[in-house]
């Protein structure tokens, strides 16, 4: 009977002591946002079409821990800054001597910094006056809340959908030195990026999150054969749709809308656009690679490419403003556009997505 009772306690997670921490004093915003960019928050401050109101209050379990989701106007912690505005810089969770050895975050991010750059830091202040600080790294400990995928230290613990995308939250664990904790300080790193914390839990013992994905390895043996795969479309093959393009782009003048359709000013035949995104450094390939990319896009049948989040990567490294361009980056950017245009592929660009205005440019 004694062995049976112990087995029940261990399997139920009682011995681990992992449980939710109270965020009521630290939380600074809600999951719902009715008005975009009003500076009043609500999740990422992107409005009703892109918030987290679909996340219901209650318990989310991710063995061996459970997270408790609060409701109301102070339910989540949001820290950081975006290209448009600053959010809170830090939030403190008072524990008043609670013993912790493992900390668990249910969180996500937006406008992430580069891979494995710090999005924020966790500072643990112990009752004996000592401290320790742990970085929260982009792409390792936390990922984008849109279309979440498993990370090295980030299990997709919750998924939902808003009008804009599939969205989700990651469960991450952080091993601590251990001891009685006075408070936990979550602070942003200073890099552009938004860190959204929906819940925090802790354990007095060492705990590891149970991975939900099982790895599968396929080996070349028996009925399994290795086949070479290339994503490029062979010129002239059945999958080559470059014949649909009417090169060069722009030959018919400006694009306009008539009777609900796109038409060019010198060609009244309706036109449809089908294309893809190039983001960040991908907007600045070498000249040879630009020709290869443009040819791949043409054979795929794309007739438009969106160049997205390039405006911070095209700036000169030493500058006092947000408009001085780097000559080398500008050359690569313009060459790519020329290579696309030559094949009949149009371009749409964002003029202000990632740039951060200098202090002298702000009102």
Image: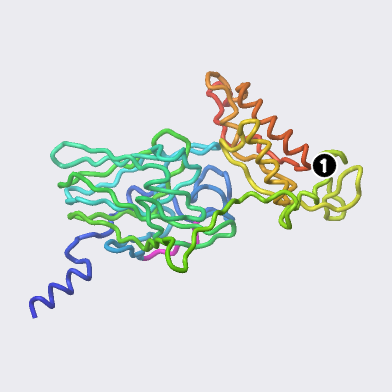
Q: Residue furthest front?
A: 222
The vertical placement of 14 against 35, above or below, is below
Label 1 CA crowd tier, 10 Å (few <14, some 14–19, many 20+): some
Q: Classify mark 1: helix, strand or loop.
A: loop
Q: How many labels, in total?
A: 1
- The reply, left or right, for residue 315 in relation to residue 212 is right
Q: Is residue 72 above or below residue 182?
A: below
User: How is colour applied across the structure in the image?
Assistant: rainbow
* Residue found at the very far left of the displayed protein: 2
Q: Residue 356: horizontal and vertical position, in percent?
A: 54, 30
Say which residue label 1 marks.
247
Residue lying at 37% horizontally and 53% vertically, measured from the top left: 154
**Magenta span has 20?**
no
Is 164 situated left or right of 187 in this image?
Answer: right
Write the residue at 17% across / 51% down: 99
Magenta span: chief secondary structure = loop
Residue shown at 47%/49% (left/top)?
A: 144
Quarter of the figure with residue 157: bottom left
Q: Judge by depth and name the residue closer to the eye, 274 or 19.
A: 274
Front one among 227 and 85: 227
> Picture coordinates of residue 332 (x, y %)?
64, 29
Q: Quadrant of the N terminus?
A: bottom left
56 part of magenta stretch = yes
Tell me which corner region of the image, top left, top right, bottom left or bottom right, holds residue 264. Answer: top right
Point out the stretch of residues depicted in magenta.
52-58
In the depicted view, which residue is nearer to us: 43 or 218?
A: 218
Q: Where is residue 39 in the image (x, y as percent from the top left)?
A: 53, 42
**Residue 129 place in picture, x, y as percent:** 16, 36
């Amino acid at each position: 009977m004694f062995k049976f009772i112990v087995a029940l306690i261990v399997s139920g997670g009682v011995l681990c002591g992992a449980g939710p921490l109270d965020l009521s004093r630290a939380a600074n915003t809600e999951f719902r946002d009715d008005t975009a960019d009003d500076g009043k928050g609500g999740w990422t401050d992107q409005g009703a079409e892109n918030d987290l109101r679909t996340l219901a209050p209650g318990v989310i379990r991710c063995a061996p821990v459970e997270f408790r989701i609060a409701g109301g106007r102070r339910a989540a912690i949001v820290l950081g800054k975006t290209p448009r505005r600053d959010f809170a810089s830090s939030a403190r969770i008072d524990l008043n001597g609670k013993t912790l050895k493992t900390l668990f975050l249910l969180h996500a991010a937006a406008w992430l910094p580069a891979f494995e750059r710090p999005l924020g830091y966790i500072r643990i202040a112990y009752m004996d006056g000592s401290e320790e600080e742990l970085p929260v790294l982009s792409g390792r400990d936390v990922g984008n809340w849109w279309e979440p995928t498993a990370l090295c230290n980030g299990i997709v613990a919750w998924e939902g959908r808003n009008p804009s995308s599939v969205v989700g939250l990651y469960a991450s664990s952080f091993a601590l030195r251990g001891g009685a904790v006075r408070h936990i300080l979550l602070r942003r790193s200073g890099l552009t990026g938004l860190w959204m914390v929906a819940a925090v839990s802790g354990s007095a013992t060492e705990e590891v999150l149970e991975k939900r994905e099982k790895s599968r390895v396929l080996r070349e043996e028996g009925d399994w054969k290795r086949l070479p795969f290339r994503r490029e479309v062979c010129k002239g093959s059945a999958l080559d749709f470059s014949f649909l393009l009417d090169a060069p782009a722009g030959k018919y003048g400006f694009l306009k809308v008539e009777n609900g359709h796109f038409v060019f000013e010198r060609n009244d035949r309706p036109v449809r656009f089908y294309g893809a995104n190039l983001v960040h450094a991908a907007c600045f390939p070498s000249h040879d690679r630009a020709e290869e990319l443009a040819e791949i896009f043409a054979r795929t049948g794309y007739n438009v490419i969106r160049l997205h989040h390039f405006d911070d990567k095209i700036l000169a490294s030493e500058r006092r403003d947000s408009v001085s361009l780097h000559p080398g980056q500008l050359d690569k950017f313009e060459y790519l556009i020329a290579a696309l245009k030559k094949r009949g592929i149009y371009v749409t660009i964002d003029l202000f997505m990632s740039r951060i205005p200098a202090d002298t440019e702000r009102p």
